[in-house]
Image (cartoon, coloured by chain):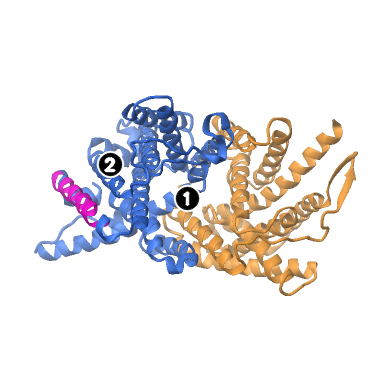
Chain colours: A blue, B orange
Amino acid sequence: MTADGSMLTMRTLAIVVIGAAILCGLILPRSLSLYYLQVADVTLINILLVLGLNFILGFGGQMSLAQCAFFGIGAYGFTLLQAAGLPVPVAAVGAIALSAMVGMALGWPTLRLKGHYLALCTLAFALIVERLLVNWEGLTNGANGITAIPGIGLAGENDKMLWVLLAIVACAYLLQVWIANGPLGLRIRALRDDPLAAQAIGVDISRLKIMLFVISAAYGGLAGICYVLLRGYISPDVFSWQSTFSYLAMAVVGGLGSSLGAVLGAILYTFVPELLRFMQEYYFAVFGVMVILVITFFPAGLSGLVLSAFRSLRRRGQSYARSDVTHHERAA
Amino acid sequence: MLQTFVQIVLVGLAVGAAYSLVALGYTLIWNAVSLVNFAQGDLVMLGAFVSVGWLANRLGMPLWLNLITMLVILGIFGAALAWGIYHPLRNAPQLSAIVATLGLSMALQNIAVIIWGPQPLNFAGPLGTTSVHLFGSTIYAQYLVILAALAVMMAIQHALFQHTALGRAMRATAQDAEAARLMGIPTARIIAFIFAYATMLAALAGWLIAPLSYVSSDMGVNLSLRAFAATILGGFGSIPGALVGGLIFGVIESAGSFYISSEYIDVIAFGVLIAVLMFRPQGIFGELELERP
């Protein structure tokens, strides 16, 4: 069980998540300036991306570094489908499907690759996608990008987009927890912890790996669509292959294999730097050092810290000793 | 026709030699402690900045002293990395260590901007823009310097590994650190030596390519990706693999950008790489066993 799910039932969690989303929707527009609202929106998009990465990397243990590519494919796919005259819902479904299909196309041939080999292959794929976005000018308008994308007419309206994004992220979050705590989630974690043993007890690990690629690509594609809706314009530099390391850093600092971690990591990476503008120049130097410190001293990430604090509070209220392992041990 | 071919191959080999130097760093560290140091490219950048930003522009050192001083500084820095980054994480899962080196990479790039500013620096190197004529083709002499430097480094490394006690200790540590420690080899110190040496190789690459491009905080990023590709292409953990992988990758890039398309060069080079991995997942010289326990 993930620590997120082991303490709360799905229904309570759903209430908590939706409540938190509504609370954010009510409070944030009142307390933040328009600029910071946009940062909040971008944070939500990053949460989506990191949730997607969490599937394949956090739960599945497959070192995929192609999240930025699916982000780009979703964004460009949606934009081009809408430009071709399709209505928004069809274009959105089409873009997610395209992203998922590309995910499958990447997952299937790389089944035999593990560890660093897979990391490089997916990174190479991300680089190839970025260069195609830059150079395939007939399709993507090259480095200039595409402007004035109609979307759903909310581009630049950061307060309204906040509600849209909160709704999408809440659903994506709950879907992830639901999958992770279900039978599929068990199989995914079996693949991560011991692929050989998982195979021996009848888990089809090849299918599972491809499925992980598909799900995480679909999340990435969805994030791409959200980005288009929010901004109304796209250019390839948003989807550069190097940005994949940012998502990786968010996932790890937040806590790998934890949905709460995806949220915390994205906030710390996207929102907090804006609040700490006075140390702008130093922030990412400090953040880099922080990544190292978190990895060294709290391998379960921030969510591990939060959850173990929560756990010890609960335990204090219970008189009997509990025998389950701590989140810290589980993640190690 | 032949001239252009010679030119393409020489330039490819020279650029590939820089990849090889970085790739060797990956390989040595990987063999010693099963860690991929993703910050290896940023050590290239750091070497170039220390050499150009401090030693050349501030202190006006002569070039040979500049090179030696820079290598000593970076060597000490590399040993510090072994103590500061690797040592605390030696028992952590592989992914944690990878991400820690990514964090290091992020920190180094931003620290470089803080110290040396966002403007790229120029470095003339020993030869400036001198060109030489070879088989009727004209190329920058600096390319030949890079090739010569790789050859010299390989000779030194061979002598070090095969004929000195330190080299034998390094090889023993790389083969089986636990057994080496039981044999009385101070493995922690040897690992620090390996980090120092790998860092010096990367820094040397930075010093060599600085005259051909600008010195900027992100100069290591592209280099590290290509060196990583070279390492994988040659077969992870194989020293000849890193060497040959780097040279091959350099030639593929140079030939691809001339004969096919310079815009799509990354697509071609990395497409070839993915294709090779599809058919030979262990790389050219790699062992079939892909994962270490």
Quadrant in which residue B248 is drawn: top right
Q: Is residue A16 magenta?
A: yes
Q: Which residue is mark 1?
A: A245
Where's residue B159, x and y in %?
75, 57
Given residues A259 and B84, the one toward you in this image is A259
Where's residue A327, x and y in %?
27, 56
- Residue neighbourhood size for the residue with mark 1, other residues' Cα within 10 Å, grouped as few (<14), some (14–19), many (≥20): some
- Residue neighbourhood size for the residue with mark 2, other residues' Cα within 10 Å, grouped as few (<14), some (14–19), many (≥20): some
Q: Left or right: A162 with respect to B235?
A: left
Q: Secondary structure at mark 2?
A: helix
- Give the residues drawn in magenta, as a range: A11-28
Amino acid type at circle 1 is Phe
Q: Left or right: A219 with respect to B95?
A: left
Dominant secondary structure of the residues highlighted in magenta in the image:
helix
Q: Secondary structure at mark 1?
A: helix
Q: Which residue is mark 2?
A: A168
Determine the chain carrying the residue at label 2. Answer: A
Quadrant in which residue B68 is drawn: bottom right
| Residue at 71 percent of width and 65 percent of height | B52
